[in-house]
Image: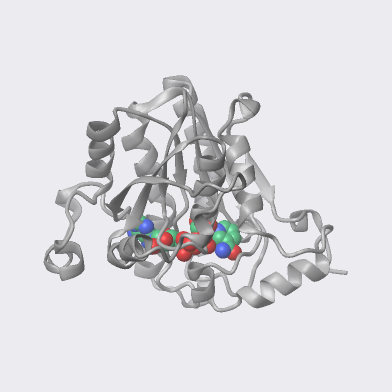
Amino acid sequence: KGKRAFIAGVADDNGYGWAIAKSLAAAGAEILLGTWVPALNIFESSLRRGKFDESRALPDGSLMEITKVYPLDAVFDNLEDVPEDIKSNKRYAGSSKWTVQEVAESVKEDFGSIDILVHSLANGPEVTKPLLETSRKGYLAALSASSYSYVSLLKHFLPIINPGGSSISLTYIASERIIPGYGGGMSSAKAALESDTRVLAFEAGRKRKIRVNTISAGPLRSRAAKAIGFIDMMIDYSIANAPLQKELSAEEVGNAAAFLSSPLASAITGTVLYVDNGLNAMGVGV
Ligand code: NAI
């Protein structure tokens, strides 16, 4: 029987989440998406108007079907967490049931269970500031949106992930090496996400036989990456210095995610898998 995947963090066709959805769809999975509430309207209307049809094309010529798009804001676990100004914000008031717990409940109601959970989201309001200039509020916001959001998603979805299922997040090498410009506590957030990948692999493995891995991806010109401001330089740097001197495509990360989600990876859990043309292995740029 086909597997069902829930992919959190898709709001256009440029990012890793979209590419992962396509690779999973190409492998036969049913696709459910979680889209950030403020980006939901434009994403759904673009989908309806056929703006993504070209990029929905799968290798066999068919178009990726998206069974359902759920509004999601992964910094809120349940309604009690949501402050008044967000509740009354008109972009949020137009949707409902978008906290992590409510989304998991809705997916359970609609489909009963899933097999694959993907976290492809991050946000650091002060990402352009060096760590030394980052406020406590900005740092904690980066951790909340980029790290705890994953703990929360896995916690709430775990009861409905079928045994043998798998969960994946996306990380970046700034967690372990100095990448000037990846600021605002985002490097710290990725370090937390990678450490949590190991602990969650243990807990979810013992509890439900679920595998937990993260992909350390190379640079991609996504919407989020463009907001950081140095993405073109990182892409050029990688092409100049990595063992494989080519631009990384989102599809290559999508394919690695499909592998990790498949029975081919049935003994792989708790790992950080580099999908970066090998750049992580270099000691100096040459
Ligand atoms: P993207 O812009 O396609 O994806 C980020 C998504 O997060 C967006 O759809 C945004 O709406 C969503 N989001 C932000 N805050 C949210 C919240 N509170 N609740 C729900 N959704 C929220 O960009 P990209 O780059 O594909 O990012 C996906 C993942 O890949 C992130 O974890 C990112 O850190 C990681 N990554 C990206 C790299 C790159 O060069 N683009 C390199 C390595 C990792």
Please name the residue shown 53% across and 69% down the image: 225
Q: Quadrant of residue 236?
A: bottom right
In the image, residue 143 above or below residue 31: below
Please name the residue shown 82% across and 58% down the image: 244
Lateral position of residue 175 relative to residue 76, left or right: right
Lateral position of residue 278 relative to residue 132, left or right: right
How far across and down, in percent of the image, does residue 255 sit? 63, 44
Q: Is residue 189 visible?
A: no
The foreground one among 75 and 53 is 53
Please name the residue shown 60% across and 77% down the image: 230
How far across and down, in percent of the image, does residue 181 sit? 59, 75
The foreground one among 48 and 185 is 48
Q: Split into 4 quadrants, where in the image is the C terminus?
A: bottom right
How far across and down, in percent of the image, does residue 257 sit? 58, 42
How far across and down, in percent of the image, does residue 33 sit? 38, 48
In the image, residue 161 above or below residue 151: above
Lateral position of residue 94 relative to residue 189, left or right: left
Q: Is residue 208 visible?
A: yes
The foreground one among 254 and 234 is 254
Q: How is the image coloured?
A: one colour
Please name the residue shown 60% across and 44% down the image: 60
Number of marks: 0
Q: Quadrant of residue 112?
A: top left
In the image, residue 258 above or below residue 140: above
The single residue placed furthest to the right in the displayed view is 286
